[in-house]
Image (tube, grey):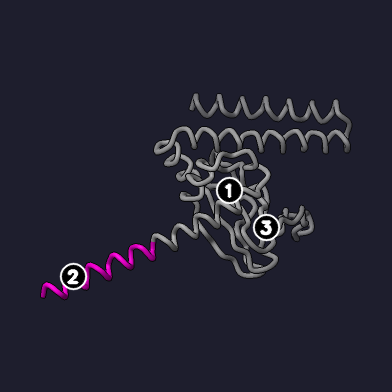
Amino acid sequence: MSSFRTAAQTARRLYQRMFRRQASERIRDVITTLAQVPAFATCTTSTLRAVAESMHRRTYRRDEYIYYEGDPGLGLYVIRQGRVRLLAEASDDGRAELGQLGPHGLFGTLSIFGDFRRLETVQAMTEASVVGFFQPDLKNLTKRNPKAGAEITMLLARHLAEEHVDLVDAMAHEVGRSSALSTVADTAARALEDERRARGA
């Protein structure tokens, strides 16, 4: 009986060591992916590791939808392998392609910060492997590791700010800078008023 118990303990230790090694390899793989995402370019190694440990791996078949425009948003995705297309509902009951993303592409960032509906539909063009980081993951990370939580929050906020500036510039090119800035200001005012009404309700 004693030799059986010893063998069982040895087998358990070997299994645990193998599991830890596999988990460590998966985390290193995610860290490598994140390090090549422009939004995370200045992220410290310790924060990359903390985020990687919180991420969820998903695989999608070719033509499978990752999410649809108007869906409740829970968080962001980073592409490890494959390509996806971003689509928007068109007036002719079809979908217009907004763009494509390949490895290290980041999408869905806005919804990491709140209950925002998805602004686009995302569909896998090839078999695609992605990692997801969701609102509960950010909250848990911030509780466990406030420094890492603050760093990743600031980097993602900066990324969204850069996208905002790019959007205003694109609008300015189409309708003129004054009209673009006026539209942005009106939108911000409406959002503030909606927030005030929601708090008063």
Front-lying residue, 120 or 56: 56
Q: Residue farthest to the left?
A: 1
Q: Which residues are magenta?
A: 1-19
Q: Disc 1 or disc 2, which is closer to the eye?
A: 2
Three-letter code, disc 1: Leu
- Mark 1 sits on what residue? 76
Tag on residue 124? none
Magenta residues, dominant SS class: helix
Residue 2 lies in the magenta-colored region: yes
Marks 2 and 3: which is nearer the front?
2
Q: Residue at label 2? A: 6
Task: Say whether disc 3 or disc 1 marks the residue closer to the N-terminus.
Answer: 1
Residues at discs 1 and 2 in contact (Cβ within 8 Å): no
| Mark 2, secondary structure of its residue | helix
Q: Who's the residue at 52% across and 55% down the image?
A: 28
Query: In x, y percent, where is residue 67?
Result: 60, 57
Rate crowding at label 3 as few (under 14), some (14 to 19) or many (20 or more) other CA atoms within 10 Å.
some
Q: Amino acid at mark 3?
A: Pro
Numbered disc in front, either 3 or 1: 3
Counting other residues with Cα less than 10 Å from the Cα at mark 2, is it few (<14), some (14-19), or many (20 or more)? few
Image quadrant of residue 24?
A: bottom left
Label 3 sits on a secondary structure element that is loop
Instruction: Say which label, 1 or 2, has the lower sequence index.
Output: 2
In the picture, the disc for residue 103 is 3
Secondary element at tag 1: strand
